[in-house]
Image: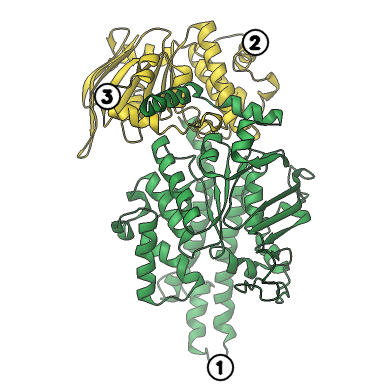
């Protein structure tokens, strides 16, 4: 037991220890400030603050110097704990390491091709409407030298498009780059990955030069995302109603009445009872949680919905209901759907068109019924043969025939 | 081999299991199917001794598992593989370390050479190569992790494996390979499986007998062919209907 648990506890213990150092420094300073801590002849920051307080207006540095020192030392202790934890950890540290640098590095001037989304481009009203999504020759490499996978190519010239109101499924196994592609469409490609070639157009507008702020306006409004794990997509300490409202308030400025009306409407659309508004995510089932995430994804009436394995974590019956719901919403609101999955059963239930991805390459593409009736590529055939439960299909179809006859 | 008799369990004011009775014969593959909340996982926890049933008993070769001596014997003869392979492996341990622990417990005082040969043989049985021995779980794919879990479960040479949703975290083609591997192991060593899942598709391909669980009760049980051809319970029919048709089998 000790063997299994103790070593894995080192990280959290170090962090707690370092946080405590910070807390102790703060506590001692606070006590000294009140005159209860270190007795006067010994120098102490809290006491210095107290002494400086009297002459604050004449000589503010007397207060500022110890104040700033306490502040910096406490922060430094916390940060140091973080670093020690990371270096003790055997696993690679996840998360965007140079997030801050990357954000700061972006040119923040307004771009000429920033997302305006004029409802219809007047100039070419006669031209066919632009595609919802157009990815052309996208190449994504691991460009960060510190990454152990430096130099590896994740997407190798992928070209896909999704027409407006179309439902497209992207099939691939783990490592095929399908989730990287989802991140690309959401503008979330971040170090160690980088787009090194090709372009991504959303609704006919090139996105290459969009800044973080530009993407913020699009994400959750025009393009939304439903992930595999609804529990991690929801905040455990906020009520569900508040979380759904927030999505709408972030992008639009609805009056309270409109907001409430839309909230009820969207819950109705995803077939959830109104009582969930006041519940917390842990109080409802996995299938209901995924419905909540879908409600958040459609409340702003987006034009493109990306669903990354939305049903993998659910049981078979819930799975079917969620898929039917997605399909239903898609056809009712002429929503474009990019559906990502490894499960051919699931895909054939929702998609008009299928794209098969492997190792960052598009292997095969075509209408769902065609691909599955006559798979061209050996890999597609392999995937088809791998599906378990072939005999259940036989049972189901014979029963259906009986029912008809 | 394993028989569960009249098992009942309540959490607070909710009845999870209500008089469940079934058995698993030696070298038999039994599927325990049910929707989420039907009590499947509670049964596996009770069998593995992670949860104490309120009433009823679990017998291992005719002896109650609440008896300490029997439990000790059964712990060796009955092993488990769980849904999330990454969570089941210690992230700080290499594959060698993970596989050695059960061996240290069950087959102590082995020569270094003999141990090495045994480790290689274990990996070979789950179709992994020996060069993975010194890797950490984060350096393996999920499918490989699940095979390592399987190898670890096979280390004490058990008679029964409790497989609790072993395939849900895996890709389709990896699933197919693992199913083939499990069936192959069954044919060569005669090991029995209790497969716990919500997915009828997997059960149909693997099991000899099915037990359908509904709201903590056994709704239906019988040989696979009989249950599939003539499902007698509404719950079974619902589960079967909810298996999405294969793309090339659409009606």
Q: Are marks 2 and 1 on the same chain?
A: no
| Residue placed most toward the observer, A394 or B218 | A394
Q: Which residue is mark 1?
A: A58
Q: Residue at x 50, y 35 (%)?
A: B87
Q: Colour of chain B?
A: yellow
Q: Which residue is mark 3?
A: B219
Q: Position of residue A346 (x, y in %)?
A: 51, 38
Q: Earlier in the sequence, mark 3 or mark 2?
A: 2
Where on the picture, by quarter, is residue B11?
Answer: top left
Give neighbour class at mark 1: few <14, some 14-19, many 20+ (Cα, 10 Å): few
Real-space CA distance between mark 2 and mark 1, rounded to the nearest whole angstrom: 81 Å
Q: Given the image, what chain letter belongs to the residue carrying mark 3? A: B
Q: Given the image, what chain letter belongs to the residue carrying mark 2? A: B
A247 to B2, vertically: above or below = below
**Which of the two discs, 1 and 3, sits closer to the camera?**
3
**Which of the two discs, 2 and 1, sits closer to the camera?**
2
Real-space CA distance between mark 1 and mark 3, rounded to the nearest whole angstrom: 84 Å
Numbered disc 2: secondary structure: helix
Q: Position of residue A17 (x, y in %)?
A: 50, 52
Q: Colour of chain A?
A: green
Q: Are marks 1 and 3 on the same chain?
A: no
């Amino acid at each position: 037991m000790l063997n299994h648990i103790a070593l894995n506890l080192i990280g959290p213990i170090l962090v707690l220890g370092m946080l405590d150092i910070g807390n102790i420094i703060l506590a001692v300073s606070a006590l000294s400030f009140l005159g209860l801590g270190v007795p006067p002849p010994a120098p102490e920051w809290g006491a210095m603050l107290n002494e400086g307080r009297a002459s604050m207006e004449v000589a503010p540095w007397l207060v500022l110097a110890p104040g700033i020192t306490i502040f910096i030392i406490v922060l430094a202790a916390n940060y140091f704990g973080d670093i020690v934890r990371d270096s003790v950890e055997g696993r690679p540290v996840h998360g965007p390491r140079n997030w801050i640098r990357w954000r700061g590095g972006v040119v923040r001037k307004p771009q000429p091709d920033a997302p305006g989304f004029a409802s219809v481009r007047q100039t070419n009203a006669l031209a066919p409407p632009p595609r919802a999504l157009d990815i052309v020759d996208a190449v994504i490499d691991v460009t960060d030298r510190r990454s152990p996978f430096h130099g590896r190519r994740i997407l190798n010239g992928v070209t896909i498009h999704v027409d407006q109101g179309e439902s497209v499924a992207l099939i691939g196994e783990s490592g095929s780059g399908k989730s990287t592609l989802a991140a690309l469409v959401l503008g979330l490609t971040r170090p160690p990955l980088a787009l090194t070639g090709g372009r991504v157009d959303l609704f006919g507008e090139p996105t290459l030069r969009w800044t973080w702020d530009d993407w913020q306006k699009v994400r959750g409004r025009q393009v939304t995302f439903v992930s595999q794990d609804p529990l991690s997509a929801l905040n455990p300490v906020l009520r569900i109603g508040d979380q759904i409202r927030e999505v709408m308030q972030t992008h639009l400025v609805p009056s309270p009445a409109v907001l409430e009306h839309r909230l009820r409407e969207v819950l109705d659309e995803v077939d959830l009872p109104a009582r969930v508004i006041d519940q917390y995510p842990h109080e409802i089932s996995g299938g209901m949680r995924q419905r909540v995430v879908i409600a958040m994804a459609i409340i702003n009436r987006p034009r493109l919905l990306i669903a990354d394995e939305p049903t993998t974590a659910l049981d078979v019956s819930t799975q079917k209901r969620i898929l039917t719901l997605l399909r239903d919403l898609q056809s009712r609101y002429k929503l474009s759907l990019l559906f990502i999955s490894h499960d051919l059963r699931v895909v054939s239930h929702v998609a008009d068109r299928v794209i098969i991805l492997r190792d960052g390459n598009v292997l095969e593409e075509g209408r769902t019924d065609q691909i599955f009736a006559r798979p061209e590529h050996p890999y597609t055939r392999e995937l088809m043969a791998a599906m378990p439960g072939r005999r259940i299909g036989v049972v189901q179809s014979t029963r259906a025939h009986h029912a008809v006859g | 081999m394993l028989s569960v008799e009249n098992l009942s369990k309540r959490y607070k004011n909710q009845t999870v299991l209500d008089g469940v009775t079934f058995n698993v014969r030696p070298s038999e593959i039994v599927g325990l199917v049910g929707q989420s909340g039907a009590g499947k996982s509670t049964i596996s926890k009770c069998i593995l001794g992670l949860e104490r049933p309120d009433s009823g008993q679990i017998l291992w070769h005719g002896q109650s598992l609440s008896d300490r001596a029997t439990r000790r014997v059964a712990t060796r003869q009955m092993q488990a593989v769980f849904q999330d392979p990454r969570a089941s492996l210690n992230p700080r341990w290499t594959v060698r370390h993970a596989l050695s622990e059960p061996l240290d417990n069950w087959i102590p005082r082995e020569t270094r050479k003999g141990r090495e040969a045994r480790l290689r043989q274990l990996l070979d049985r789950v179709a992994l190569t020996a060069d993975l021995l010194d890797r950490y779980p984060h350096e393996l794919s999920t499918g490989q992790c699940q095979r390592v879990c399987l190898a670890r479960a096979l280390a004490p040479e058990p008679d029964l494996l409790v497989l609790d949703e072993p395939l849900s975290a895996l890709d389709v083609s990896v699933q197919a390979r693992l199913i083939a591997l499990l069936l192959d192991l069954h044919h060569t060593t005669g090991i029995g499986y209790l497969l716990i899942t919500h997915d009828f598709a997997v059960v149909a391909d693997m099991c000899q007998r099915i037990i359908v669980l509904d709201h903590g009760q056994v709704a239906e049980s019988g040989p696979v062919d009989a249950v599939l051809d003539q499902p007698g319970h509404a719950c079974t029919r619902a589960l079967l209907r909810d298996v999405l048709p294969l793309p090339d089998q659409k009606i």
